[in-house]
Image (cartoon, helix red, strand yellow):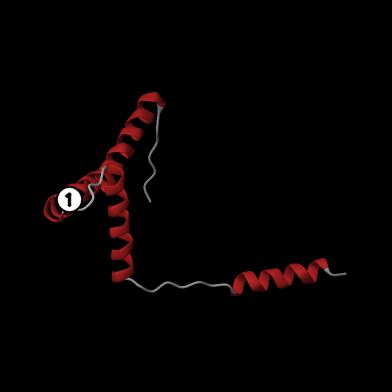
Amino acid sequence: MHIFEIKGVSGLIAFLAAVAGLLALAIGIPALFMMVVWNALVFEAFHGPQIGWAQGVLLWLAALILLKLALKPHVSFEFSKMAQESSEVKKRLDP
């Protein structure tokens, strides 16, 4: 694990600029690409609805979720620890 030290206002500004750049690379540019592709295919070719940048972000996030579900569909939930803890709490509360 890396530890980064932020020293002073200039370090904070550099950190915020790095975070903004990472967000632009991870979300902004692919969302812009999704928007352009949607508008080129659906709006121009099939006369469907035109989307803006916000809808491009939503389309990109939907694509990421669908890729996650397609590539690793296993989702598990574990309730046993909560049930054990609640029974232990009940035992402590009952006189």
**Residue found at the very far front of the displayed protein:** 47
Percent of width and height locating residue 1: 38, 51
Residue on which disc 1 sits: 43
Q: How many marks?
A: 1
- Quadrant position of residue 67: bottom left
Q: Please identify the residue farthest to the right as the structure is shown.
A: 95
Q: Residue furthest left?
A: 45
Give the structural element (helix, strand or loop) at label 1: helix
Q: Quadrant of the C terminus?
A: bottom right
Which residue is found at the position 50% from the left and 72% from the top? Answer: 77
**19 up-or-down from 46: above or below:** above
Q: Which amino acid does the dot numbered 1 rest on? A: Phe
Q: Look at 21% across and 51% down and name the residue there.
A: 34
Q: Quadrant of residue 8?
A: top left
Q: Give percent across and percent down for residue 31.
A: 25, 48
Q: Residues within 10 Å of mark 1 (few under 14, many from 20)?
A: some
The image shows residue 17, relative to residue 38, as above or below, that is above
Foreground residue among 70 and 58? 58
Report the front residue among 63 and 2: 63
User: Residue shown at 21%/45% (left/top)?
Assistant: 32
Which residue is depicted at the point 35% across and 28% down?
13
Q: Is residue 45 left or right of residue 72?
A: left
